[in-house]
Image: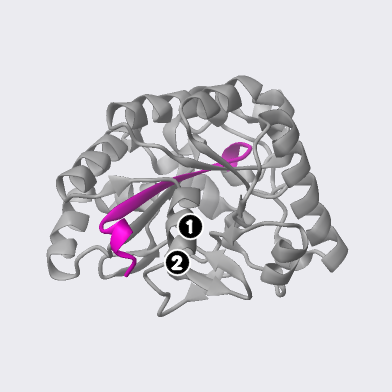
Amino acid sequence: MNQKLSKTAIISIDVETDWGGRLPASVETIRGVKVGLPKIFEILNQYQCPATLFINGEIVPDIQEELNIAIQKGFEIASHGFTHRKMPELSKDEIIEELSKSKAILEEYTGQKIRGFRAPQARIPQGLYQYLKQTNYEYDSSVFAGKMPSRFNNQNVPIEPYLQDNIWEIPVNSLPLIPLPMGLLWIDLFQLSLIQLLSSVSPLPPIVQVYMHPFDFIPAYSVEDLSIPWGAKLWYTRQQGSSLKTLNCLLYWLQQLGYNFRTAGDVINSYSMS
């Protein structure tokens, strides 16, 4: 392991429209960003915890205030594609367009170089690393350890960042003894106390990455969109507003375990120099 990064935690936030990016982009469908994201920022600030925001390009014009706050806090801005379409269903030209357009609009609105990418719903298309290199990205964070039917089945994922076709990959690790990625809502579902107990048997890796979405932090509202699967509706309506408490307790626990909070880009900087 890179000794400079002993016990490092990355907090990543997928910034997209509500209902897991399933709604068309408009000011009415980004309630999570407008209401939930500031709540996340407040908790992160308590722990002096930076974050990496993977952002859908199509909502950028409507979230300038949130972008400015993130930049002022020193957070990293990265790409989550331009839309939230399933990338394995797109043609090569469409994938290139998703990568290029999101990078261009994020760089235009932030004035920062956009280095990282995460595929919507962690659905990785064939040739992704080649396309990332072609569009001048430096790293990816689309590999989620564990299994989610129809999305991914990633067993034996490395616990550290690794090079894949000259692109750095920063994987999201799995929960201790549970073959699911370390998402905040999964932790909320199983309860942090259980995760802590399981980690006494199967310790957390030296580099931990936790992912979340702004919509995770607001009450789910009813939608008439029939394209949203019943499972997604059940998943989001299940939450009872406990995500904020879970995030606060999780950050406190990680801090007590000796983890330092860093952005994905900072982690890649350390690996690139080692």
Residue range highlighted in magenta = 1-19
Q: Decide: is 252 above or below 167.
A: above
Residue 171 visible, this angle? no
Picture quarter with the C terminus: bottom left
Task: Look at label 2 and name its amino acid.
Answer: Pro
Picture quarter with the N terminus: bottom left
- Residue 9 magenta-drawn? yes
Q: From the viewer's side, name the closer residue of 19 and 161.
A: 161
Task: Look at label 1 and name its amino acid.
Answer: Ile
* Residue situated furthest bottom in the rendering: 156
Could you tell me residue 129's position as x and y percent?
Answer: 67, 69
**Secondary-structure class at tag 2:** loop
Could you tell me residue 44's position as x and y percent?
Answer: 35, 32
Residue in view at x 71 percent, y 29 percent: 109
Q: Which residue is mark 1?
A: 268
Confirm or deny contact between disc 2 and disc 1 (CB under 8 A): yes
**Secondary-structure class at tag 1:** helix
